[in-house]
Amino acid sequence: MDVGYLTELLADSAEGLRPSGRMVTSDEGDRDVQPLWLSDGPATAELWTRMHAEHARSGLWWPLLLEALDPNDGEFRPWGSGDVFPEQMSSPASHDSAGLLARWWDTYTAVDEDDDMLDADRRLAVMAPFGQTWPGLALSRETTTNPDQQADEFAQGFLAKRPHTRLGLVAAATGAEALTAAGWTGPCNYDNDTAKFSAVVRHWEHRFGARVVAVGFSTLHLSVAPPPANEYEALLVAAEHFAFCPDNIWQGSRPYTLAAYAERITGAHHWDFWWD
């Protein structure tokens, strides 16, 4: 981790783009683990764009817009309090994203007679038209949209709605890898190893021009270029999203069906995930 390079980069920033901040120390046993730099104050769209462009040039220090569990909490959890655990994670490169999605789909579509959320008929109705059969991956699409420009535009809109967001910088080659490197544990109620989720996001980076823009305690926000353009494409992408984050379907959109969720993401240039 080239902290010296980061220090020089921030010191050389233009007036108004020279944020104060600190390296965050992980709460893990090794107190020398510092997985990310966190700004002391709110992020700006100009700062995000500048750091994003610098990453494109150097391949170092991926910028993340970071949200706290409670913006009024002075600790800015989990980031400022060190509730991040990079040493517990495996490597994203050690996981097959397609295999992960298929296995997760099988797990979450299995009929459980003791389920107090959905009975068997409702559970199968939610997954129509696929039912319990994994439909496979959605096809990638060609686009003339620049994924990094799309990310910059999404970051600008995101910050306009969330003034308490801070900037995080993570020593990682991609946004997907930054999730693991930062020790983020958002999906821990489903799996403690963030590297598995990073592997899927990395696949989306290649197939859909996805970019990791913002992360919260248990939320993830990606820009996308291009999005699914028709109903069937959107259904296949929705199936991937359900396997990746079932709460997006079970608890995040009404009515709780794959088809309704697919309609919502058709043509949308950002994907948002929340794990209960």
Image (cartoon, rainbow, N blue to C red):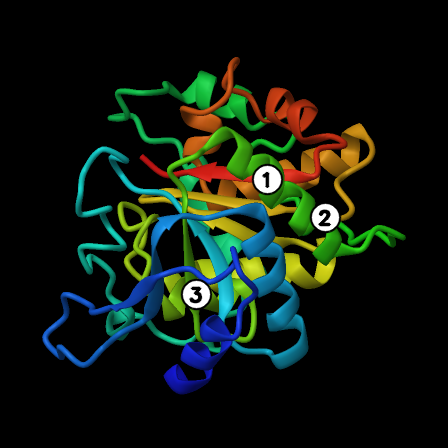
Query: Which residue is tagged 3?
Result: 169
* Image coordinates for residue 230, horizontal then vertical, percent: 82, 31
User: Residue sitting at 66 percent across and 50 percent down?
Assistant: 152
Tell me the number on the disc at residue 271: 1
- Nearer the N terminus, badge 3 or badge 2? 2
At label 2, counting other C-alpha atoms closer than 10 Å, the crowd grade (few under 14, some 14-19, many 20 or more) is many
Q: Is residue 92 visible?
A: no
Tell me the number on the disc at residue 150: 2
Q: Quadrant of residue 262?
A: top right
Quarter the N terminus occupies = bottom left
Question: Along the line of sight, which residue is nearer the eye, 252 or 4?
Answer: 4
User: Residue sitting at 18 percent across and 42 percent down?
Assistant: 74
Q: Helix or strand or loop: what does disc 1 sit on?
A: strand
Quarter the C terminus occupies = top left
Amino acid type, mark 3: Leu
From this view, report whether residue 275 is shown above or below residue 121.
Answer: below
The Cα–Cα distance between marks 3 and 2, rounded to whole angstroms, is 19 Å
Q: Helix or strand or loop: what does disc 2 sit on?
A: helix
Between tags 2 and 1, which lies in front?
A: 2
From this view, report whether residue 217 is shown above or below residue 31.
Answer: above
Q: Quadrant of residue 2?
A: bottom left
* Image coordinates for residue 125, horizontal then vertical, percent: 54, 20
User: Residue sitting at 55 percent across and 58 percent down?
Assistant: 201
Q: Helix or strand or loop: what does disc 3 sit on?
A: strand
Q: Tell me if 78 is positioned left or right of 270 in this view.
A: left
- Nearer the N terminus, badge 1 or badge 3? 3
Amino acid type, mark 1: Trp
